[in-house]
Structure formats: C-alpha cells, structure tokens
Amino acid sequence: MPRNRTVRFAVLGNSVQRAAAPGYPSSRSSAVKRRIIVGGLVLLSLVLITVSFRSSALDGVQGTVAGALRPFEIAADRVSRPFRDAAGWAHGLASAKSDNRKLRTQVQTLQQQLIQDEGAVNENVQLKAQLNYHGPPSLQRFRRVSAAVLANPLTALDESITIAAGSDDGVKNGNVVITPQGLVGTVDKSRGSISRVTLLTDAQSAVTATDLTNPAAVGVVRRGGGGSDVLVFDRVPKAPYVGIGDTVITAGSVSRALPSLFPHGIPIGTVSSTSGNDINIFQTIQVEPFVNFATLQSVIVLVPKR
C-alpha cells in the first residue's frame, strides 16, 4: 500500500511541471510577422526601382502593376475633379469681379467726360449766339459734286487733272476739290461738263493750315523741294511745338475781307518730320499727304450753297 501512493505522487508531480512550461505569446508573433512583411515590401520596391533604371527586364511587370493601379488613378481623378473645378470657378469669379469693377470705373469716367464735353459744346453755342460769332466756313456750307477723273497728269511736270464736272454742274473756278481721304486742289478752269483741277502739289498751290492737335500752330502748306509729293508745312513758329504724327488740316479764314477758299477742317496729311535751328525762328516741317495724287479715279467738288 505505501508503494502505490508514492507512485501516484510522482505522476502528479510530473504532470504539474509540464503544464507550467514557458511558451511565446500570440501578439508578439503577429508583430514580428508584420515587420517582416513591411521590410520585404520595402526591399522589393528598392529592387524594382533599381532594375527599372538599369534595364528593361521588368517592363512587363511594371506594365502589369500600372494596369492594376489604373482604376485607382481614375477614381482619384474623379474624386478630385470637382474640387479642381470649384477652385477654377472661384478664381474665374474673382477675376470677373475685378474686371467688372474696372469697367464700371471706366464707364463712370467716360460718362463724366461726356457730360463735360456736352456742357462745353452747349456753352460754345450760347457764346457764339451772344457774340454774333462768325467762324471759318465749314463743309456743311457746301454741296458736293462727285466727278470721275478723266485724265491724270500727262507729264512729270504736270500737276493737274481733268474731271467730268463743269460749269453745267455749277462748278466754278476756285472751287475746292477733295476726296474722302483729304484735300486734292482747286478748280483752275471750268466749262461745260469738264474742269481742270490744279493739284496741291503744284508749285503755285498753297493753303493756310493748322495742326489738329495744336490749333495755335498755323502756317502754309505748299509743295516741298524735289520731285516727290511730300508737302511742307511752312511759316510755323517753334512754339507751339508740332510733333511727328500730328494731323494737318485746312485752317479756313475768319476774315470777311479776305475769305478763304478752303473750308476749315479738310485733312491734308500727317507730319512726317520736324527740325529747327537757333537761327531760323520757324520750324521745318514735312507733311505726308493723305491723298495719292498719281492714282486719283474720282473726286468731290465743293460748291458753295446759295
């Protein structure tokens, strides 16, 4: 009997020792596995990048990966597109508001300028009526007779043309001839249904003119030197200054004793050059005429209204 109890105790002692044997926790094992997987992915990425720069052996793999990632790229683009559109719309709206403010400012400025101009015009009309003012003749005081050019200058020294309008049409000697571009000359001889017109480029032609920008600059436009059609704006003082690009027009005349044949405001040409020196009190001004005198096909004769 005592022997059997001893064996039982030994067996029980051995079973207790095996149950207490140490082991690895499951959470620690999972963390180690995750670290191994992450390290492997990083290593694989480095290998793929290195090989892609050195050879094309993995082109197929890269294409497969790119194809697999394509749906995600499309989805990301669709998700971000509304935000990009909203940002663009906001930027465009801000720009439109800024442009709108600028346009409103410009409109207000132009409206104020228009009001001032209209007021100046009305005041000018009233002053003229009070002073019984008579200015130079204007184009409104003439009726227009259109005529074809029958003959252009016959020689290099000829500075006249023949037109298909004469005394039968009310045209008289001294009538001014123009085109829509500007001044041509004056009627030299008229009879029946034809007239001869002396061009502004003739050595005997001259007209009192002024600068459209600086009306105080008054002089005489005549033919320049040489064989070209360049005109000279002569007898113009150094002050006020006449600049290149200024438009020269007919000045007309306010004198009833010496009335001008030319209405005020007929375009003549553009200032092409200016010069001067300390000795001469006048400017040397060349004018490029608006009219091409060598290719005239039709003209307009200004006949005074009765």
Image (spheres, rainbow, N blue to C red):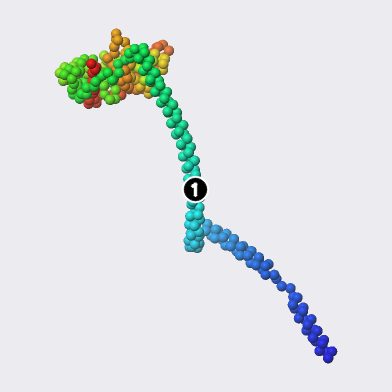
Indicate the position of residue 199 as horizontal and vertical percent values: 25, 19
Q: Tag 1: residue type?
A: Ala
- Furthest residue toward top: 257
Above or below: residue 96 compared with residue 46 = above
Residue 142 figure quarter: top left
Indicate the position of residue 234 as horizontal and vertical percent values: 34, 15
Indicate the position of residue 170 as horizontal and vertical percent values: 19, 18
Task: Point out the image quarter for the C terminus.
Answer: top left
Note whether residue 115 is visible: yes
Residue 106 figure quarter: top left
Q: Is residue 251 left or right of residue 301?
A: right
Task: Point out the image quarter for the N terminus.
Answer: bottom right
Q: Nearer the viewer, residue 142 or 239?
A: 142
| Residue wearing tag 1 | 86
Above or below: residue 94 compared with residue 3 = above
Indicate the position of residue 62 as horizontal and vertical percent values: 50, 61
Mark 1 residue crowding within 10 angstroms, few (<14) / some (14–19) / many (20+): few
Task: Give me the residue at 74% from left, 73% from top.
Answer: 22
- Furthest residue toward bottom: 1
Q: Is residue 138 left or right of residue 213?
A: left
